[in-house]
Image (cartoon, grey):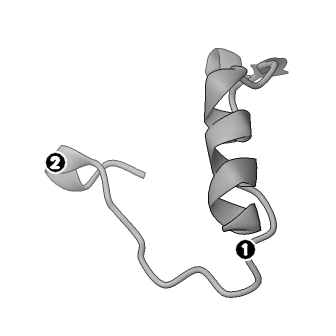
Amino acid sequence: MIRALALLLLMAFPAAAQTFDTSAGRVEVTRMAGGLDTPWAVAFLPGGAS
C-alpha cells in the first residue's frame, strides 16, 4: 500500500529534466523510474540505429 502511494505521488509531480550537450546536439534526459536494482527489459530504436 505504501509503495503504491509513493508511486502515485511520484507520477503526480513530473521529474525535472536534465539537458546535456553532446557531439550530436543537445539531449534532454528525464528520469522515468528510480530505485530499480535489476532492469529486466531493453528496447531498441527502429532501424537498428545506435
Q: Is residue 40 above or below residue 13?
A: below
User: Pointer 1: residues within 10 angstroms few (<14), some, or many (20+)?
Assistant: few
Disc 2: which residue: 47
Foreground: 50 or 15? 15
Left or right: 27, with 37 as reference point = left
Question: Comparing marks 2 and 1, which lies closer to the viewer?
Answer: 1
Where is mark 1, residue-wise? 36
- Of the two numbered discs 2 and 1 on the same chain, state the one appearing first in sequence: 1
Q: Where is residue 45 drawn, in percent x and y?
A: 29, 49
Query: Disc 2 versus disc 1: distance between alpha carbons?
Result: 28 Å
Q: Amino acid at mark 2?
A: Gly
The residue positioned 62% from the left and 41% from the top of the image is: 8
Q: Is residue 9 above or below residue 37?
A: above
* Rendered residue at 81%/19% (across/down): 16
Residue 47 placement, left or right of 33: left
Tags 2 and 1 touching, CB below 8 Å: no
Q: Say if 25 sits above or below 6 in the image.
A: above
- Tell me the element at label 1: loop
Please name the amino acid that badge 1 sits on: Leu
Q: Quadrant of residue 17?
A: top right
Residue 47 locus on image (x, y percent): 16, 48
